[in-house]
Image (cartoon, grey):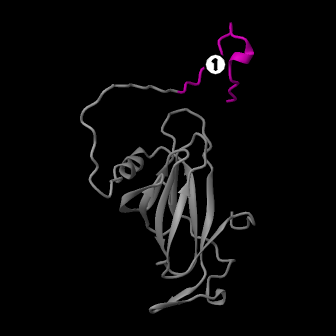
Amino acid sequence: MTGNVDTTIVPIHAGERNLLRVINAALNQPLFFTVANHKLTVVGADASYLKPFTTKVLMLGPGQTTDVLITGDQPPSRYYMAARAYQSAQNAPFDNTTTTAILEYKSVHHGNHSQHHHSKGVKSKTKPIMPPLPAYNDTNTVTTFSRSFRSPRKVEVPTEIDQSLFFAVGLGLNKCPKNFKSNRCQVLHY
């Protein structure tokens, strides 16, 4: 992984606080996301502000965006930013690879200021530190993260309802019945 020239490098200066917008661009797969040795302060999700909370791991549903603050408060080095699938369904196939980018310190913090020139930064040959990721089926981490979402202010919810609607949406993985023509079914490859 460290020899891959296609790995994205995200620069950060020591002492600096950056806003990251983390986007799950996967079509059907929730993802865990973390940065080695760094805390993430969640400040928004899907274009809505939240009451900020700090976490080590994000969980993003497909298409979800999460805005987080990250501070360059670690020893100058290179740290992997890593994401991998969350999958709680048993015996369902899924892509369990881990994708990475590298958070790379570009300056060294000295007292109340940082020196912002690369010669004092981290050597690009330094092997990045890999973060621990939750198990692919770690529902407790998902639940803890989801329960941390709060509105920054009191929200008035309507108490009188004109219509009650119930929607149930499901995705089943069933083999095509033998009496169906092939163009009526999607081919599943196992």
Residue at the top extreme, as displayed: 179
On the image, the x and y values in percent for residue 148 come to: 34, 54
Q: Above or below — where is 146 with respect to 182?
A: below
| Residue 153, quarter of the rendered image | bottom left
Q: Is residue 190 left or right of residue 173?
A: right
Residue at the left extreme, as displayed: 159
Front in this rendered view, residue 1 or 177: 177
Q: Which residues are magenta?
A: 171-190
On the image, the x and y values in percent for residue 138 come to: 44, 46
Q: Count how many numbered circles sit on residues in the image.
A: 1
On the image, the x and y values in percent for residue 110 come to: 49, 92
Which structural element holds mark 1? loop
Asked if residue 148 is among those painted magenta in the image, a careful observer would answer: no
Q: Is residue 143 left or right of residue 104?
A: left
Circle 1 residue: 175
Three-letter residue code for mark 1: Lys
Q: Is residue 53 left or right of residue 105?
A: left
* Residue name at image x 44 percent, y 25 percent: 168
Front in this rendered view, residue 121 or 148: 148
* Residue name at image x 65 percent, y 77 percent: 126
Asked if residue 182 is among those painted magenta in the image, a careful observer would answer: yes
Q: Above or below — where is 130 with respect to 146?
A: below
Q: Is residue 10 left or right of residue 39?
A: right
How would you classify the magenta stretch by its main secondary structure? loop
Image quarter (top left, top right, bottom left or bottom right) of the C terminus: top right
On the image, the x and y values in percent for residue 20 come to: 53, 65
Q: Above or below — where is 25 with respect to 19?
A: above
Front in this rendered view, residue 150 or 29: 150
* Residue name at image x 56 percent, y 50 percent: 24
